[in-house]
Image (cartoon, coloured by chain):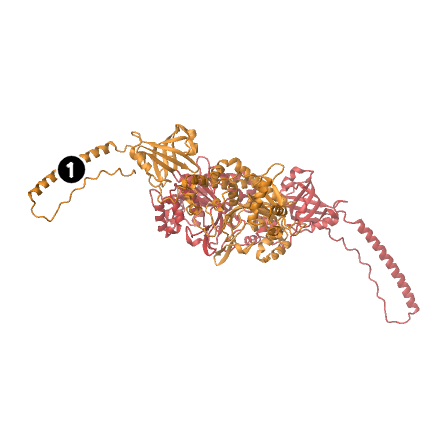
Chain colours: A orange, B red
């Protein structure tokens, strides 16, 4: 399956005969004889050259033909059970002959006898080199290898050797692989919109180059997400995303929660009709759930006691901002409370602290990878006896007023003031993470429990990271009469939510909960600045692809 | 908050005076004097009786008034931090005074001085009794308690005592609670469509009663799902559902998979246009993903190597059967393969074995609870050196032909023959779990890799439990040219799936995977006979509520 050998030299171009003349002159004949002689000599020379080329070709016959080339399409033809290794394991394999599948991250030929390859597997890479050697590696093999496109997937056999000096261009820098065989598993059949190296380049590197490097814009990345996701940064981001989910579940599992799965298809537009996607459902219509709010409360009314759900949440809001998606992952929980809704607030606080710890303790390597491209101050939170900073809504407003914001503007705290508050809190309390409790009732949804003494306030809270909201939660109303009254107050017809209300009519424990936006947590913890970077294939009002 | 005390006796009715006569006769006067005397005596008697009643009332004054009643609406008024206990922990608390929140599962008054309560928390229950005692429990308190509706949520204080004999009607039968205080947290404000006892009744019990008990039909249950879900059976089913998810993740996590979340909103109808729900998306349209197939393959093309996803899957098929839902939970995975697609098949097999083990080892109690209502032979699988039974499609067909099915019918194996095969396999191999490999190419989707030697066959497999398919999977085509060709063969325009195809054009490792229906696994493992019982709030062509 090796490529064709080099083209042989072309024979010298022949002179065309001049036609349309009758009877050659003597001088002409002489000329012709001379030409014939010349031609003969040229032919002899060509023959000789051909013979020489053949000799040379024979001398250079590709003794390495079986050691490289394109593999036939992998259709599971055989199963030799040869172990293949991870690049990360190479430092402990000095001297071993290994087999590995990797991408060609980049390659650099050194003359015709040597080629350097940077081989990549996810966030790991290693240098490989192929050097012409009798009986082993041919010039043709080197040439073919050097011609392979970046991002090709290859199967490489080689010997692991200590590298003479640390190789900075690879994550595994103490060893390199001396290649003995190299086969193409999957080639690249399209022009790369950008390289993975481009995708991973930091702003500092681009600036230092005097903007010689390609700055890959977010839209270009998202349009070509498959290649963008191959970058070290993205491999790390989505490993951390998975970690947040794992840490969420571990904490809740150890606190007696069980996972539920509630339907996303709803018979009625719930919570607030304006921002719900409509679905054609056989001969009728349905709606996509804006949150699992109603279902998880019904699970509480059904005695599940402590439930969580990780699932997609749909919002038909035409918000084209750095922090809105039309579909995102909700990490939701709901639990019964015994005495006070602060039981839930403290559970959620414990959950976040546990997630922060888990990330810092087990994913520092990935965090460092992301930080290279997205520099960020280390995420800070308070612990120990002082605990997480908890402000009442009123205290938060006072902090903003002290800082110069007009009190009249602060019926609600808008995004700008939210961020300003984040900066004030960071300066004053040295924390990127805090809670605001006791929101005004009018800012919260109908199912929020009012404060027992001040009916303008509610038993509700928001959690913040780096000055942006990442969780909203509250004690919920479990009394059907008060719930109906509140629904009417917000213009919702109770009959339209009958199944939900019935749950409370049949007796329901006091309860509360909260909903976390996974992508927001990820964006803010890593300071990615745009939520689309925290979503595998983001969806916004203008993007439904890929 | 005690009820009004009993009404006191009415004073005797007075005789009305006779009017319209002038000048009383002597006899009349005598009569009057007698009457006055009588009246005086009666008044004296009445006064005496009133005095007596007052004395009696004083004697019966509700000395227990503070020990029972309806609590004000729980708005987190205070937080005394009194620990509350689980019913399951009671056997180890003999002699302790405990506080617990529970539902009244049922109650039975014994005269006016005693009431028995069955208190329930999820799948646990305990007997409580309240007995009139001077200074502690009043008759009024017993009467009020006996009048509380089934399913009321109460806060109970009492002393845990060894019960004289095992109480069979409660799951915690060795102890009972002697109640000293009882308060209503949440009452029942609607007529119960059925009781939780009805919901938990077994068919055998109903039959033994001569059909005196209420047989709660599936539709009634689903229409009133909140109360239905409170049954022991359902509490156990959904604990096992959560366990399947946990076991799925644990196994994959320990095998290097990471979790991804792919969008359910799609720009184009994919895989097969016929069974896709259409969504209004701002000024345009979108579709709900039928599976994460394309996204997880793109994740492989993006070098994620091993991914899984747990998420909703939408099918707009008007199938009204025991095993179809329009929305269900997909447990999906995809991984690169090195040499052979059997690497994936074996990974999936290991996954199922690990789930079966986990359920048997850690959830036998819940399985037993479900079995009471849904009797089933214990689920059997093969292990050890012989391993899971693997048949080729051809071998499966041969087994059916041997059993009497006409070979002509067996181009595909329909549901009926699928079940028949399940019975044949169970009889012959004593297993409820097996794999069929090498399906005909024409039965599989366009992205399935053909067999390397026989182009009519494919590198694909289905997994079965109790004769029903629970997983479908295959090696996928990673070569863009072959993929395009296969798309065209199935009438799909490659340009409509450009984002997906581009992933392969930029180089993609050989890979394969599979998708598992969570509810099907649950239904078949527990033999629930209808998939709706395995879904918290099921969705089918006719059901979008609750």
Query: In the drawing, does residue A125 fall left or right of residue A292?
Result: left
Q: Nearer the viewer, residue A212 or A165?
A: A212
Find residue B226 and report its horizontal and vertical position in percent: 58, 51
**Quarter of the rendering occupied by the N terminus of chain A:** top left
Find residue B222 and report its horizontal and vertical position in percent: 55, 52
Query: In the drawing, does residue A19 fall left or right of residue B492?
Result: left
Find residue A205 and report its horizontal and vertical position in percent: 43, 39
Query: In the drawing, does residue B32 fall left or right of residue A503?
Result: right
Q: From this view, report whether residue A142 is shown above or below residue B109.
A: above
Q: Pinpoint the chain carrying mark 1.
A: A
Q: Nearer the viewer, residue B229 or A208?
A: A208
Q: Nearer the viewer, residue A405 or B290?
A: A405
- What residue appears at the point 40 percent right and 37 percent down from the top-left corner? A120
Q: Nearer the viewer, residue A174 or A1?
A: A174
Find residue B215 and report its horizontal and vertical position in percent: 58, 52
- What residue appears at the point 13 percent right and 45 percent down from the top-left corner? A17
Task: Give the residue at mark 1.
Answer: A42
Callout 1: SS: helix
Q: From this view, report whether residue A152 is shown above or below residue B290.
A: above
């Amino acid at each position: 399956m090796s490529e064709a050998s080099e083209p042989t030299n072309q024979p010298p171009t022949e002179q065309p005969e001049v036609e349309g003349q009758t009877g050659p002159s003597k001088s002409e004949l002489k000329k012709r004889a001379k030409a014939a002689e010349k031609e003969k000599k040229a032919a002899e020379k060509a023959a000789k050259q051909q013979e020489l080329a053949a000799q040379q070709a024979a001398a250079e016959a590709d003794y390495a033909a079986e050691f490289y080339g394109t593999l036939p399409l992998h259709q599971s033809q055989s199963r030799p059970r040869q172990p293949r290794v991870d690049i990360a394991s190479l430092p402990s394999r000095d001297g071993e002959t290994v087999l590995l599948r990797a991408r060609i991250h980049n390659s650099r030929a050194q003359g015709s006898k040597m080629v350097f390859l940077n081989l990549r597997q996810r966030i790991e890479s290693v240098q490989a080199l192929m050097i012409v050697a009798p009986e082993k590696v041919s010039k043709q093999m080197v040439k073919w290898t050097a011609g392979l496109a970046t991002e090709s997937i290859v199967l490489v056999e080689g010997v692991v050797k200590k590298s003479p000096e640390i190789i900075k261009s690879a994550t595994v820098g103490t060893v390199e692989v001396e290649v003995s065989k190299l086969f193409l598993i999957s080639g690249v059949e399209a022009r790369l919109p950008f390289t993975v190296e481009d995708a991973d380049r930091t702003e500092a590197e681009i600036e230092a180059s005097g903007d010689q490097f390609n700055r890959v814009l977010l839209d270009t990345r998202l349009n070509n997400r498959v290649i963008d996701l191959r970058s070290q940064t993205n491999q790390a981001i989505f490993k951390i995303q998975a970690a947040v989910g794992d840490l969420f579940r571990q904490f809740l599992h150890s606190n007696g929660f069980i996972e539920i799965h509630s339907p996303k298809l709803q018979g009625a537009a719930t919570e607030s009709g304006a921002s719900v996607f409509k679905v054609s459902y056989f001969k009728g219509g349905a709606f996509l759930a804006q949150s699992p709010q109603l279902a998880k409360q019904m699970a509480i009314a059904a005695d599940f006691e402590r439930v969580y759900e990780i699932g997609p949440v749909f919002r038909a809001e035409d918000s084209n901002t750095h922090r809105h998606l039309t579909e995102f992952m909700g990490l939701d929980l709901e639990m019964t409370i015994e005495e006070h809704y602060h039981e839930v607030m403290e559970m959620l606080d414990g959950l976040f602290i546990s997630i922060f710890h888990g990330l810092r303790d087990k994913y520092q390597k990935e965090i460092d990878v992301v930080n290279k491209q997205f520099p960020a101050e280390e995420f800070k939170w308070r612990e120990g006896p002082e605990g997480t900073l908890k402000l009442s809504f009123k205290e938060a407003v006072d902090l903003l007023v002290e800082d110069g914001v007009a009190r009249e503007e602060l019926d609600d705290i808008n995004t700008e003031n939210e961020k300003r508050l984040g900066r004030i809190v960071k300066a004053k309390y040295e924390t990127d993470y805090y809670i605001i409790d006791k929101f005004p009732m009018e800012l919260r949804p109908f199912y929020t429990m009012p404060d027992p003494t001040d009916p303008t306030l509610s038993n509700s809270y928001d959690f913040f990271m780096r000055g942006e909201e990442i969780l909203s939660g509250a004690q919920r109303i479990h009394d059907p009469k008060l719930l109906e009254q509140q629904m009417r107050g917000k213009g919702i017809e109770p009959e339209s939510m009958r199944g939900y209300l019935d749950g409370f009519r049949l007796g329901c424990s006091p309860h509360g909960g909260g909903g976390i936006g996974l992508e927001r947590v990820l964006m803010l913890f890593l300071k990615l600045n745009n939520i689309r970077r925290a979503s595998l294939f983001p969806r916004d009002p203008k993007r439904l692809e890929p």
